[in-house]
Image: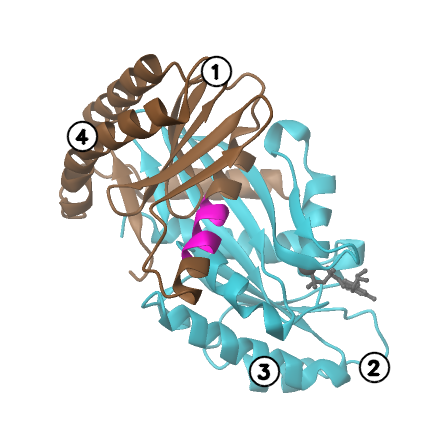
Amino acid sequence: MGTDELNIFEEEFWKINQVLEKLLRETNARTVLLIDRAGQLITSVGDTSTLDVPSFATLSAADFAATAQLALLIGENAFSTLFHQGENQSIYISIVAEKLILAIVFDKRTTLGLVRIKANQVSKELDGIFKTIFTRIKGSYQKTIDSDFLSEAESELDNLFK
Amino acid sequence: MSLINYASKEINCKIVYYGPGLGGKTTNIKYIYSKITPEQRGKLVSLDTELDRTLFFDFLPVDLGTVKGFKVRFHLYTVPGQVYYNASRKLILKGVDGIIFVADSQIERFEDNIESMENLIENLKEYNLSLDKIPFVIQYNKRDLPNIAPIEELEKALNILKVPSFEAVATEGIGVFETLKAVAKLVLRNLGK
Ligand SMILES: Nc1nc2c(ncn2[C@@H]2O[C@H](COP(=O)(O)OP(=O)(O)O)[C@@H](O)[C@H]2O)c(=O)[nH]1
Ligand SMILES: [Mg+2]
């Protein structure tokens, strides 16, 4: 089919989380989020208790997409990172595995320099993990989405939108 | 792109409301927001101008509930309709899983609908997508107004692919859930294919 699908399995998911946990620890950041290019959260580590995560994921994907277009307008291929500085907290955003968005929320307990260096380091690890995920052949695994799933999902839809 | 996470047991899909400016896309999403319980939806994010016109997009996450152990969530987006916001429209189509075209039924907007449909087809090309390859439905909105084109004429001009289509009065919620349900079903059927 025409639309993309991103399937992430158990073992990969825990590997990704481990990498992000390490990043969180080593940078002393508040929250680290990994987001797909459609603005959907893949996973997050750290403190999200006061963060509206779906909104954050959507807006950072939109932010990055808009900035990439700005780059084209001035003849740059892309801006590889984005940095928004607040009075108390800041956001550092970069692209990993070519099309995923890594967003790091941090405060004065750390510095932009450290965040940048550590983000660069983990991006190589994430590249490796996602290479497997992106190149996996669709349909080569047990399907969750079978006819049972569909009929159940459709009756949920009927319930939700009465 | 649909995101299926087998570890956290989540499925996420992206649905975009497309169509000419002032056709009723934001009204659709606001109605949905107002009618489902807070447990089933997230915050409505609107990036609009002071004049309450969509500048970049509106965004609403809707939880379908748990299906076979998986949390299924739809992310609803609207695009800005005005011709000069094409760069934004293109960006929002990134990773789209299903599209609802909201047409404005008023006779004076007939050409705007056609232009917006052509623009949609053009923008999808950038992502190697086309309307016959993606879950797609049409909504003929504002059926309550006096100066509207007959459905047959709208169908002839806009529904070349004969996809499911619905009459709506979004301000009163008529046809809103019906339209979303239709595209959501197509999106789900498309999963795992
Ligand atoms: N009469 C009538 N007005 C509508 C209907 N749906 C939307 N509108 C009005 O049309 C205007 C534009 O709607 P909006 O949702 O902002 O359009 P968008 O640009 O497509 O997002 C608003 O003033 C709405 O109240 C409808 O079904 N009937
Ligand atoms: Mg709008």
Q: Position of residue A78 (x, y in %)?
A: 34, 55
Q: Are marks 2 and 3 on the same chain?
A: yes
Range of residues picked out in magenta: A61-68
Q: Is residue B191 above or below residue B127?
A: above
Mark 3 to mark 4: distance in Å?
47 Å
Q: Is residue A133 above or below residue A110?
A: below
Is any part of residue B175 visible from this angle? no
Asked if marks 3 and 4 touch (Cβ < 8 Å), the reply is no
- Identified at 56% across, 24% down, the residue is A51
Mark 4 to mark 2: distance in Å?
60 Å
Q: Position of residue A106 (x, y in %)?
A: 46, 22
Q: Say which amino acid is labelled 3.
A: Ile
* Chain ID at mark 4: A
Q: What residue is pinned by disc 1?
A: A47
Comparing labels 3 and 1, the label whose residue is closer to the camera = 1
10 Å neighbourhood of mark 3: few (<14), some, or many (≥20)?
some
- Identify which residue, A38 or B85, lies in the foreground: B85
Q: Say which amino acid is labelled 4.
A: Glu
Q: What residue is pinned by disc 3?
A: B114
Q: What residue is pinned by disc 4?
A: A125
Q: What residue is pinned by disc 2?
A: B147
Mark 3 to mark 1: distance in Å?
47 Å
